[in-house]
Amino acid sequence: MTDLETKIKQLIIESLDLEDMNVDDIDSQEALFVDGLGLDSIDALELGLAIKNEFNVTLEANSEDTKKHFYSVASLAEFVRANNP
Amino acid sequence: MKWNAWAPGVNTRKDWHEWAKNEKDFDLAQIPDVSFIKPMVRRRLSSLAKMVFATANQFIDEQQQPMPLVFASRYGEMDKTVQLLTQLCNQEGLSPTNFGLSVHNSLVGMFGLVKKWTDSSTAIGAGNKSVSAGLIEAYSQSKAIQAPVLYFYYDEALPKVYQQYRDGLNTPPICIGLIVDASDQAMTVLYHSIKKQVAISPIEFIQLLISRNV
């Protein structure tokens, strides 16, 4: 697990009030939404805001690319790395 | 009559009868127990929402058939509103979750989701007449459909920045839940006494329920 992935996991836990969870409970490759961690559309908006504030990157709503970036912690980390060198 | 109320330290019918006799007092350190709600849902519940679910859990069982919902509150999710306004003043991005959950009908929507009740819902705010406005609405709906309606009133103290605007005393966080059936004689008597005392506070309303022994 990279430092960036750990940071994103912490951000997920804090911004989405997942009080009973810690970073080890989230698998970097696992789907964040619906089947995997079980997050929903409100979480997607909240997480988008948190990512924007933390890493100063902009995610476009309703784009297919955004859906791909949000698939897992690993894909989010890749996106942040590519846009915030 | 089926009702219950939750305030910190006083949250069963027995507690309320002892409170009315000055044998029990509020304990502000107590928070509502909602451990029966799944964690993924629980994380979204505000302190107001937790009070509503804790109250409901005491007098409505899982087998209860859905019925229309009337929710009333004077201040609603004022804490969330203050947070959002503060973020706005600081030119920060607003939390979408907080925004969604700050609106007046969010709690009744959350109740429908959690309980899987698809019946109609109404959210009322009517200043210092909110308790009675909610009851009058619930009673009227019950009379119209000739079936019971579930009524909740809930409030907490105003946030610090708004304290100068409050009228009357700060009451503890409080939630009252009541099944309103217009065909019930005792309910009709209660309804008529509320119509004569529209600015009734939640505490006075509980005192009225206890004094009428309903």
Image (cartoon, coloured by chain):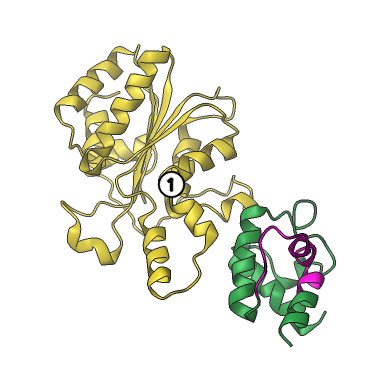
Residue sitting at 36 percent across and 25 percent down?
A: B138
Q: Is residue B112 visible?
A: yes
The chain displayed yellow equals B
How crowded is the residue under tag 1: few (<14 C-alpha within 10 Å), some, or many (20+)? many
Give the magenta-colored segment's residue range: A58-76
Which quadrant of the figure has residue B170? bottom left
Q: Position of residue B132 (x, y in %)?
A: 25, 32
Choose between B209 and A30: the one closer to the eye: A30
Q: State the image coordinates of residue B155 (x, y, percent, origin top left).
A: 33, 48
Image mark 1: chain: B
Depicted B35 relative to depicted B122: above or below: below
In the image, B200: left or right of B181? left
Residue B54, visible in the rendered structure: no
* Residue type highlighted by circle 1: Met
Palette colour of chain A = green
Q: Would residue B80 be counted in the magenta stretch? A: no
Residue B2 rendering spot, x and y as whole percentages: 40, 25
